[in-house]
Image (tube, rainbow, N blue to C red):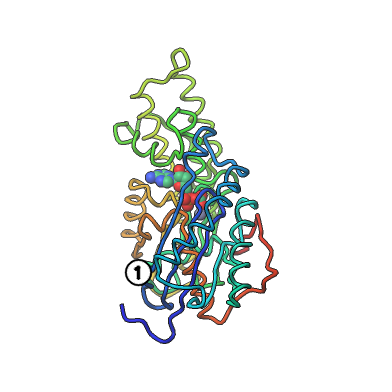
Amino acid sequence: MVTGPKDFTVLGIETSCDETAAAVLRGAPGAVPQILSHRLLTQTEEHAPYGGVVPEIAARAHIRHLDRLVSEAMDEAGLGYADLDGIAATAGPGLIGGVIVGLMTAKAIAQAHRKPLIGVNHLEGHALSVRLATPLEFPYLLLLVSGGHCQLLGVEGPGHYKLYGSTIDDAVGEAFDKTAKLLGLGYPGGPAVQAAAESGDDARFKFPLPLKGRPGADFSFSGLKTAVRLQSRKLAVDGKVAPQDIADICASFQRTVGDVIVDRTTNAMKLYEADVSGRPLRLVTAGGVAANTVLRARLEGLCQARGYSFDVPPFEFCTDNGAMIAWAGIERLAKGEADALDIAPRARWPLAG
Ligand code: KG4
Ligand code: ZN
């Protein structure tokens, strides 16, 4: 790729959940950027015994590893801090201890080297991540499905989002994780449930379809989680559920999640189509759950039926990473935006109202 004079070189730092990540990117909106380095350390093993992310363990792990990962990312990029146009870090939403670690590190680097600081909304990082790999134009409809988030958003451009729906209880990744924990499949649950579902019968159990058929594009997964718990209790012999029953529960659960997502996304598409009338229709799915091949196939079918293009970022950029934070920093720097050094870390930070 040829770099132009308007390219920005940005270090991105991500610490809002259980991934410690740093990446250096060079590029500008309108083209696929160069990923000069991309370092990531996942804390999966440290949280596995608890079946979910423990905030205090996560924050301590970020402190332990972040400085080294940033140095490695800079070395791999072959750059010094003087070569950067900005430092971007997740400023929220997320586990506050982790967010503080990443944002304070970014502030220190920005201040020491007199570089602009960009405090990135983690959700904006996911929302723009598709543009790391494809120069997809705005606007698009985004289905953001991760362990912490489940939203349908209209993306008009950096800083411009419209919320069509979000979960009223659990995020979809959380539903996968809790189902896996319940069935003894380990953590993280999404890949384990998908793998178990491969040898299961997805029509064996009729689980409830939360909010299906209702107007609007909100999600709900807590009833489904309860139904899975009741079903597995019914099937258990001496507290143990047989492998084939587990596979059938996983397959039925996954199909139900697919039904709910297709139903909610269809409603959001109708609202979105009224808003973007006449412009090309595009759906993007991002977040860790976008890795699920069964859900992807369902969404692909929906897009074909309604005349949408369908894009998913490459897997490594679907889950939390530093490259998407650096890229969101580039998109904002290109608009002439940066933040003051006193920007506060935020546990909650909706992208759109
Ligand atoms: O985006 P992400 O890395 O972290 C958050 O910001 O939450 O998403 C992690 C979530 C976890 O809940 C994990 O179980 C889920 O994504 N996940 C999957 C799959 N791979 C990861 N869920 C369903 N199917 C998968 N193949
Ligand atoms: Zn995330």
Q: Amino acid at mark 1?
A: Thr
Image coords of residue 225 (percent x, y): 52, 34
Q: Which quarter of the picture shows residue 99?
A: bottom right
Q: Nearer the viewer, residue 190 or 187?
A: 187
Quadrant containing the N terminus is bottom left
* Number of marks in the rendered image: 1
Query: Residue at left 49%, top 32%?
Result: 181
- Label 1 secondary element: loop
Q: Which quarter of the picture shows residue 336?
A: bottom right
Vertical position of residue 153 compared to residue 29: above or below: above
Q: Nearer the viewer, residue 198 or 224?
A: 198
Image coords of residue 264 (percent x, y): 48, 52
Query: Residue at left 41%, top 87%?
Result: 5
Residue sitting farthest toward the top: 238
Residue sitting farthest toward the bottom: 5
Q: Is residue 12 left or right of residue 194?
A: right
Vertical position of residue 114 compared to residue 14: above or below: below
Vertical position of residue 63 compared to residue 82: above or below: above
Q: Can you identify the residue that label 1 sits on?
A: 134
Q: Nearer the viewer, residue 242 or 68?
A: 68
Image coords of residue 296 (percent x, y): 35, 51
Specify whether residue 150 is in view.
no
Specify whether residue 124 is in view.
yes
Vertical position of residue 43 compared to residue 227: above or below: below
**How would you rate the neighbour count of disc 1 (Cα within 10 Å): few for under 14, some for 14-19, many for 20 or more?**
some
Image coords of residue 243 (percent x, y): 35, 24
Q: Is residue 212 left or right of residue 202?
A: right
Q: Is mark 1 within 8 Å of ligand 1?
A: no
Quadrant containing the C terminus is bottom right
Q: Which quarter of the picture shows residue 256?
A: top left
